[in-house]
Image: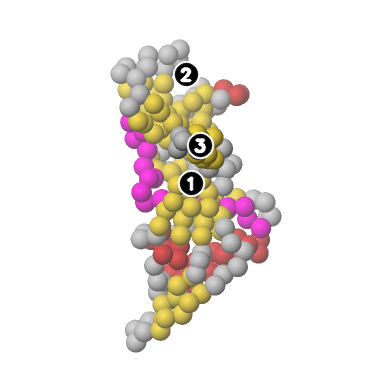
Amino acid sequence: MAGQFAEAQLDPNITIGCKFTVQFSRTKVYTQGGRLTQRFNWTKPKHILDLSYIPRPRTSYAWLLDLFYVVMANGYVGFRVKNWGDYFLTHENSWMTQVDGGEWQLQRVHYFGEAIFKRDIYKPVPGTCRIYRHSGGLGGFVSEATDATLDSTTGRATIPAHGAGDVYTVLGQFDLPMTFTNDEWVTNLEATVQDLYQSPDPILLEEILL
């Protein structure tokens, strides 16, 4: 079991109201004259989720603590997390790139003018994604690629009836593969008349690259 990925999704209600961070790494150097030079160290982002951003009622706290025990005690490398700010794939923000072995990797596309960044998506949500074929390229006839199969554990697809010039987009949802950043669990207890609220301090999740 150790080293496996737990394909279960963290309860999406738990991530409502939490704080998401997108992190890159770069080295900045300012010359004596004030000029900035930059070296970009990462080519891929890391997403960080702060679960301690809001107090939690007893049921939500217990569910999250159970997850911490299960993941850490069993040595799971990660689990699925929904980022409410970015979880839906459309024709405009998705892409399939052909990789080794004739498979296609699902990607989330980010645009800024003519520049683009394609981010690999490894955890499409099972049962939500459909692959669409754009015959002859974008702008061509669009139809569902019913022959295609998408692996929800890797984000890779097989498309047997691929034709020259065809490109593919996806409609559906995706999760982030994440794990606990810290090795310990610290809790602040806040009692009220109606319930006991617990604030984990801090409980951070970080994206893992698969």
- Quarter of the figure with residue 2: bottom right
Measured as percent of width and height from the top left, residue 165 is found at: 42, 14
Kindly identify which residue carries mark 2.
Answer: 162
Q: Which residue lies furthest to the bottom in this view?
A: 193
Is residue 25 inside the magenta stretch? no
Marked residue nearer the N-terminal end (1 or 2): 1
Comparing 22 with 193, the one in front is 22
Which tag is nearer the camera, tag 3 or tag 1?
A: 3
Quarter of the figure that contains the C terminus: top right
Q: Which secondary structure lies at badge 1?
A: strand
Measured as percent of width and height from the top left, residue 5 is found at: 60, 50
Cα separation, mark 2 vs mark 3, equals 52 Å
Labels 2 and 3 touching (C-beta < 8 A): no
Q: Which amino acid does label 1 sit on?
A: Gln
Give the label on residue 116, or none. none
Task: Look at the magenta stretch and give its main secondary structure.
Answer: loop
Question: Is residue 201 something that shows in the picture?
Answer: yes
Measured as percent of width and height from the top left, residue 137 is found at: 37, 17
Kindly identify which residue carries mark 3.
Answer: 31
In screen coordinates, is 150 left or right of 12? Answer: right
Q: Which residue lies furthest to the right in this view?
A: 2
Q: Which amino acid does label 3 sit on?
A: Thr
Residue depicted at 66% across the width and 61% down the height:
74
Q: Which secondary structure lies at badge 3?
A: loop
Residue depicted at 64% across the width and 50% down the height:
4
In screen coordinates, is 94 left or right of 8? Answer: left
Cα separation, mark 1 vs mark 2, equals 36 Å
- What's drawn in magenta, residue-wise? 75-93
Q: Which secondary structure lies at badge 2?
A: loop
